[in-house]
């Protein structure tokens, strides 16, 4: 079960570019188009123009959450993975415990613990309430940001651990033989080789992160999901807003997968 | 393969049906899964308690219905009713024109004013002018969310919507909100707790707007379910007339909860 | 009493402690996780077989299913399926001329988690079946085994070592995904924790307590799954198992 982390991302496999012109595909596409048209025709969409601006600003918040937490989470994941390979022992143990703890409990619970638990703790100390940090601590997004970042760091940290330990020993020994110092060898050989190795799983991790972002709506962050919640409460429609939301996320996932594929293709020598 | 899948789907549906098929007079009543004292909240033994829960028992006994309580997120109550997950809603849901487009209501069984509370030591009026630049919290999908949207959205700094009322209360105590708008009775209940006493006070009632705030709280039923609606109407009338209503209410309130 | 109070009496198993309620919530979470995982496995076996050996149309439809489920946040799928699932079953009953049914929260929860898990199971099992060395299946055919017999005697046992790591993960994901049902108001561990926290105002303590329970489930699962995995890998050479 130690290697479980490398499987966790459940890498999102993009559909292969296949011929879309086979007769049965055309027929299927026609059926889906018919469903789409009848959904557009028979369901209620008159609310859409009224919420257009809010939907766009919600989408922006969602994207900002996704990108910022993935980038910062990755920055934390590198040392988390590295110390588990290099030691020292106590640090390795701590990093391992951290990853196990975060990956072993639901993100929703972590988020609520941070926001409703820790967040209301701050308010009890007048020093904190009068400090520069209070205007930020008062808002909801820092807690959403923290929870999502921690989560990404823990999952990606496990992946980085596998990647660091998977770089062939010979390459590091060769670096030594060339007279590289430890830091230079890390910077020039070990780190880039490990990152290459994680690239295929990074797509899956980022898609998972995207799918976790709507949780921040439960602590009052106005992301795409909470704009749709607003639509639902104003219009009392059950399915239309949720179906639109699913469609938007599906598109975002598609865009992410394509973007990562482009990125991977640009990097000439990928690790194996 | 398709046939096997189809058969499996039907078998599954039938299996589910066999397990959960219900008798005609058994109904499920949806209640907000978040604590909403003193009307409905879970206690430490997992039982639901409160004025509205006792009232539910009284109505169901009167109408000879076997009622099962079904906790559901407040913003999911109406969808759950229309998806037949539940058969009625008794969750302090006010009768409004907007909601009447989606579901139907019995006659009202209580009516209380809407109020605003805020932190101690900060003086402001419960008006658009008084709330200028403040962060106000409401529970999602409530009449209060709709009211704030119409009257205060332009003047306040931010409207925060919470899934449950107690989370809004907690955030006011934590200093992350400057005000909450909600039902006066539930707010008073919060102000009586240690947490509420320490942090907050009543700022006053908001100006009434029956179009949004509605005309009291009723039992929500599906539009086509007129038989059930009639049963509840008769039960409410009977419980009011035979003194049960007042007996239960006296345990919780020292004022007339039914309203005018 | 404040959000930070740590009155451990509140965790006692008997009223006024909320420990009993939390444990009951944990049981509900596990019921949904087990049910959802098994339903997902069923969908997965069907889905993987159909993807590998089914007709073109069926394969494409399954591709749509797995792509959509894996590309849309679980929270949104749960919201849609929780209401739509009940609606759909009732419509089906109407078509079949049967009376409408009352679907319990538990059945709906299992259905929702199962449909989500099914998409991932399909992919895990498909990958595992494809990882079986082709020679083994050919040998089975050469011995004159019928397809069904070779599925039971060769394909299923041979794929297990490849499938178990992925399925273990799915189980762990299932236990954590049940927490999302709190958003629709299903009384599993996270929701009852939230109710206990909201009523007592001891947010920190109750969320920590629930975290410990979830962590115990994960750690215990890891031990058991590790043992199962070891057993399933018997008789595999090192590089085959890697």
Image (cartoon, coloured by chain):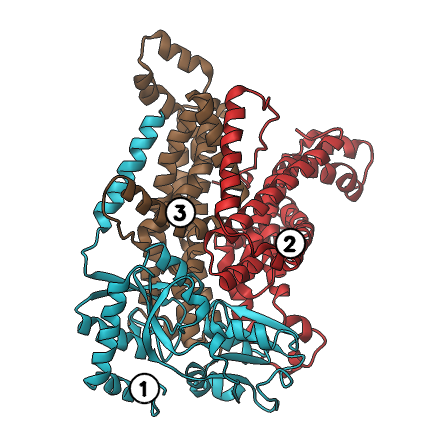
Chain colours: A red, B cyan, C brown
Would residue A256 be found to the left or right of residue C149 on screen? right
How many C-alpha atoms fall within 10 Å of the one at disc 1: few (<14), some, or many (≥20)?
Answer: few
Q: Nearer the viewer, residue A154 or B206?
A: B206
| C-alpha gap between disc 2 and disc 1 | 45 Å
Mark 3, residue position:
C112
**Among the 4 quarters of the image, the one containing residue A161:** top right
Q: Residue A96, image x and y in percent?
A: 56, 50
Question: Quick one: SS at disc 3?
Answer: helix
Residue picked out by circle 1 = B252
Q: Residue at x 36, y 49 (%)?
A: C87
- How would you rate the neighbour count of disc 3 (Cα within 10 Å): few for under 14, some for 14-19, many for 20 or more? many
Q: Where is residue A20 shown, x and y percent of the image?
A: 58, 24
Disc 2 marks which residue? A59
Q: Quadrant of residue C49?
A: top left
Looking at the picture, how far across and down is residue A150, in whole percent? 60, 56
CA gap, disc 3 and disc 1: 40 Å
* Point 43% across, 85% down: residue: B193
Closest to the observer, A88 or C15: C15
Residue found 48% across the figure and 55% down from its top: A106
How many neighbours does mark 2 have within 10 angstroms: few (below 14), some (14-19), or many (20 or more)? many
Chain containing mark 3 = C
Label 2: element kind: helix
Q: CA distance from mark 3 to mark 2?
A: 26 Å
The lab-note entry on whether marks 3 and 1 share a chain reads no
Q: Are marks 3 and 2 on the same chain?
A: no
Q: Is residue A15 above or below residue A64?
A: above
Residue in front for this viewpoint, B249 or C71: B249
- Marks 3, 2: nearer the viewer: 2
Read off the chain for label 1.
B
Give the farthest residue toward the right: A179
Marks 3 and 1 close (CB-CB < 8 Å): no
């Amino acid at each position: 079960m130690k290697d479980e982390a490398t499987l966790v991302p459940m890498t999102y496999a993009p559909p292969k570019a296949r011929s879309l012109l086979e007769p049965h595909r055309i027929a299927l596409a026609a059926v889906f188009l018919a469903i789409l048209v009848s959904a557009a025709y028979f369901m209620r969409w008159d609310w859409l123009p009224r919420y257009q601006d809010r939907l766009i600003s919600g989408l922006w918040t969602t994207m900002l959450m996704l990108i910022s937490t993935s980038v910062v989470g990755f920055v934390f994941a590198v040392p988390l993975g590295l110390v588990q390979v290099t030691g020292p022992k106590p640090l390795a143990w701590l990093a391992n415990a951290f990853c196990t703890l975060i990956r072993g409990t639901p993100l929703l619970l972590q988020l609520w613990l941070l926001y409703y638990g820790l967040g209301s703790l701050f308010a009890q100390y007048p020093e904190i309430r009068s400090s520069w940090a209070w205007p930020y601590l008062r808002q909801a997004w820092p807690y959403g940001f923290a929870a999502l970042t921690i989560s990404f760091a823990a999952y990606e940290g496990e992946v980085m651990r596998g990647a660091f330990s998977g770089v062939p020993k010979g390459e590091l020994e060769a670096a030594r033989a060339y007279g590289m110092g430890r830091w230079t060898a890390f910077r020039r050989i070990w780190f880039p080789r490990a990152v290459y190795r994680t690239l295929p799983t990074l797509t899956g991790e980022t898609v998972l992160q995207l799918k976790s972002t709507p949780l921040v709506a439960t602590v009052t962050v106005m992301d795409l999901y909470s704009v749709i919640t607003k639509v639902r409460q104003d219009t009392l429609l059950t399915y239309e807003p949720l179906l639109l939301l699913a469609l938007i996320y599906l598109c975002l996932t598609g865009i992410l997968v394509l973007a990562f594929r482009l990125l991977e293709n640009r990097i000439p020598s990928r690790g194996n | 393969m398709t046939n096997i899948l189809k058969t499996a789907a039907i078998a599954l549906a039938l299996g589910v049906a066999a397990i959960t098929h219900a008798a005609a007079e058994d109904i499920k009543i949806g209640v907000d899964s978040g604590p909403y004292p003193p009307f409905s909240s879970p206690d430490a033994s997992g039982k639901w308690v409160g004025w509205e829960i006792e009232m539910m028992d009284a109505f169901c006994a009167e109408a000879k219905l076997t009622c099962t309580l079904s906790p559901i997120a407040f913003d999911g109550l109406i969808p759950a009713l229309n998806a037949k997950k539940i058969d009625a809603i008794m969750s302090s849901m006010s009768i409004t024109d907007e909601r009447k487009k989606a579901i139907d209501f019995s006659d009202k069984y209580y009516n209380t004013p809407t109020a605003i509370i805020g932190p101690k030591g900060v003086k402001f009026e419960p008006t658009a002018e008084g709330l200028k630049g403040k962060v106000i919290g409401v529970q999602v999908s409530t009449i209060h969310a709709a009211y704030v949207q119409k009257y205060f959205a332009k003047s306040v700094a931010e409207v925060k919507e919470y899934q449950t009322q107690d989370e809004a209360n907690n955030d006011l105590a934590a200093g992350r909100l400057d005000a909450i708008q909600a039902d006066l009775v539930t707010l008073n209940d919060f102000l009586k707790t240690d947490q509420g006493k320490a942090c907050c006070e009543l700022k006053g009632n908001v100006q009434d707007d029956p179009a949004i705030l509605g005309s009291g709280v009723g039992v929500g039923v599906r539009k086509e379910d007129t038989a059930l609606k009639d049963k509840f109407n008769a039960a409410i009338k009977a419980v009011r007339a035979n003194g049960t209503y007042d007996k239960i209410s006296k345990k919780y309130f020292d004022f007339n909860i039914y309203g005018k | 009493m404040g959000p930070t109070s740590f009155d451990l009496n509140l965790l006692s198993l008997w009223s006024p402690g909320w420990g009993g309620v939390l444990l009951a919530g944990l049981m509900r979470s596990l019921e949904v996780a087990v049910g959802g995982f098994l339903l997902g496995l069923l969908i997965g076996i069907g889905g993987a077989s159909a993807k590998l050996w089914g007709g073109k149309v069926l394969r494409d439809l399954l591709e749509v299913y797995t792509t959509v489920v894996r590309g849309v946040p679980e929270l949104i799928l749960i919201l849609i399926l929780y209401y739509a699932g009940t609606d759909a079953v009732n419509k089906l009953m109407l078509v079949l001329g049967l009376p409408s049914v009352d679907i319990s929260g538990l059945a709906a929860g299992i259905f929702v988690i199962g449909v989500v898990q099914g998409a991932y199971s399909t992919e895990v099992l498909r990958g595992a079946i494809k990882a079986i060395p082709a020679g083994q299946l050919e040998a089975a055919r050469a011995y004159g085994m019928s397809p069904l017999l070779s599925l039971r005697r060769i394909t299923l046992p041979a794929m297990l070592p490849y499938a178990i790591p992925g399925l273990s993960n799915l189980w762990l994901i299932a236990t954590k995904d049940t927490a999302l049902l709190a958003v629709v108001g299903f009384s599993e561990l996270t929701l009852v924790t939230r109710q206990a926290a909201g009523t007592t105002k001891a947010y920190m303590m109750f969320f920590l307590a629930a975290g410990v329970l979830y962590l115990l489930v994960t750690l215990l699962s890891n031990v058991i799954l590790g043992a199962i995995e070891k057993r399933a890998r018997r008789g595999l050479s090192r590089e085959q198992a890697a």
